[in-house]
Amino acid sequence: MSESLHPIIIEIETPASTAEAWMALTDPRRIVEWLTDASQLGAVGEPYRLDFGDDSVVEGSIQEVDPGRRFSYTWSWTDASPAEQTLVTWSVEPLANGGSRITLVHDGWAEAGADVSTRGDHEGYWNGYLEDLAEILAEGG
């Protein structure tokens, strides 16, 4: 695997409880506050969709759900040619202070045939989105 196509791994710590963090990651009414319009998190194998507007849509399927702790879904832009399918995994862990740690792992770049630029663009976007998520959770939202 090319070192430049290594997984994107971003962690944030928040004073929000694990339950609050989980809701911010899985409830479409909360996701729109920091990311975009999202479909409801379903069971393994069910479709998952994120609509960023202007025909920028990510479609995938749920790969794993461990309620309150971890979930993952495939990630593929509907307008990408050729299609590049990667994997996004979210996890939530409790902290000793009652807060939580949220970890994003976006992997599968080399397997998807993605280039360094595509991976780098996604890392920049994710950093911004997780900053927004951290702010919302810190405000008690």
Image (tube, grey):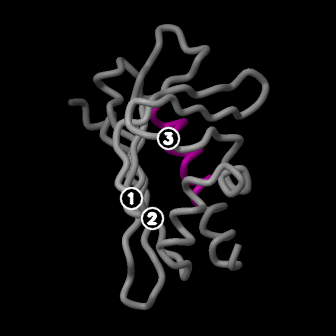
According to the picture, the residue beneath numbered tag 2 turns out to be 102
Asked if 106 appears above or below 100 in the picture, the reply is above
**Residues drawn in magenta:** 119-130
Residue at 69%, 69% (x, y): give it.
136
Q: Residue furthest left?
A: 1
Mark 3 belongs to which amino acid?
A: Gly
**Front-most of residues 18 and 133:** 18
Identify which amino acid the numbered label 1 is placed on: Ser
Q: Position of residue 37 (x, y in %)?
A: 71, 41
Name the chief secondary structure element in magenta.
Answer: helix
Q: Where residue 15 sits in the image (x, y, percent)?
A: 54, 82
Determine whether, in the image, residue 122 is placed left or right of residue 53. Answer: left
Residue to which mark 1 is pinned = 91
Q: Which residue is mark 3?
A: 42
Sequence-wise, the earlier of marks 1 and 3 is: 3
Label 3 packing within 10 angstroms: few (<14), some (14-19), many (20+): some
Q: From where the camera sits, is residue 122 visible?
A: yes
Quadrant that contains the C terminus: bottom right
Residue 120 sits inside the magenta stretch: yes
Magenta stretch holds residue 100: no
